[in-house]
Amino acid sequence: MIVTPNRGSLFKVLLFAIMLGALLYYVVEMRPLARKEIMGWASDEEVAVPALAPADPATLFKADFFIDYRLERERVRGEQLELLREIINSPNTDETTRKEANLRWLRIAADIGRENEIENLLRAKGFEDAVAFIYDSAVVVVMKAKDLTQIEAARVAEIVTKCTGVRAEAISVIIKPQ
């Protein structure tokens, strides 16, 4: 017996693959650093290597705004996605609500990717660190810097506009010295 998938199941598989890819990227690229810096999770071998040991052991447990923000953003997004999954999979959900939940799921997945892209591009352009949060019609970027020149602010706005399509007037850049 040969089973042919319908459009709905293909859509769900594609959506799952996109979310899994985004999660794997985050886990591989970002999560190991966060665990080491915030929680102090390092194996005995890592602690024993002088090049990896911090100059001041207290800095290992020092909270970092940018890491904390990313972890909190991940937690909130995970809760949103879990709620959407429950709505999508519930037999009591009508088709219109299910479609809206699927669209919202896709928007969250796209936002996750664009936020990561913005943050990585800003670091690639020489900025120390940044976190981005995409709203429906605006973007907020928190930059790790003492100050920003007009030229640097324009570069940030240009990167955000290219990644999101949001106009420069709808982009807020906040300076957070660490």
Image: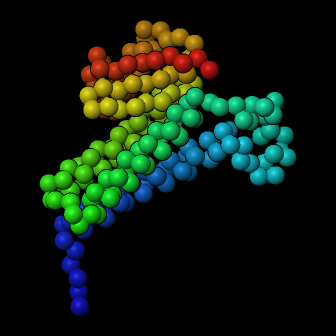
- The image quadrant of residue 59 is top right
Visible in this render: residue 155?
no
Percent across and percent down for residue 136 are: 27, 32
**In the image, what residue occupies the spot 39% across and 42% down?**
112
Visible in this render: residue 76?
yes
Quarter of the image where the N terminus is located: bottom left
Percent across and percent down for residue 117 are: 42, 37
The front one of 35 and 128 is 35
**In the image, what residue occupies the spot 47% across and 23% down?**
142
Is residue 130 rendered to the left or right of residue 163? right
- The image quadrant of residue 40 is top right
Quarter of the image where the C terminus is located: top right
- Compared to residue 18, the image places residue 34 above or below, namely above
Is residue 139 rendered to the left or right of residue 3? right
Percent across and percent down for residue 39 are: 68, 43
Percent across and percent down for residue 69 are: 52, 33
Toward the front, the furthest residue is 92
**In the image, what residue occupies the spot 42% across and 57% down?**
20
The front one of 13 and 99 is 99
Is residue 174 rendered to the left or right of residue 171? right
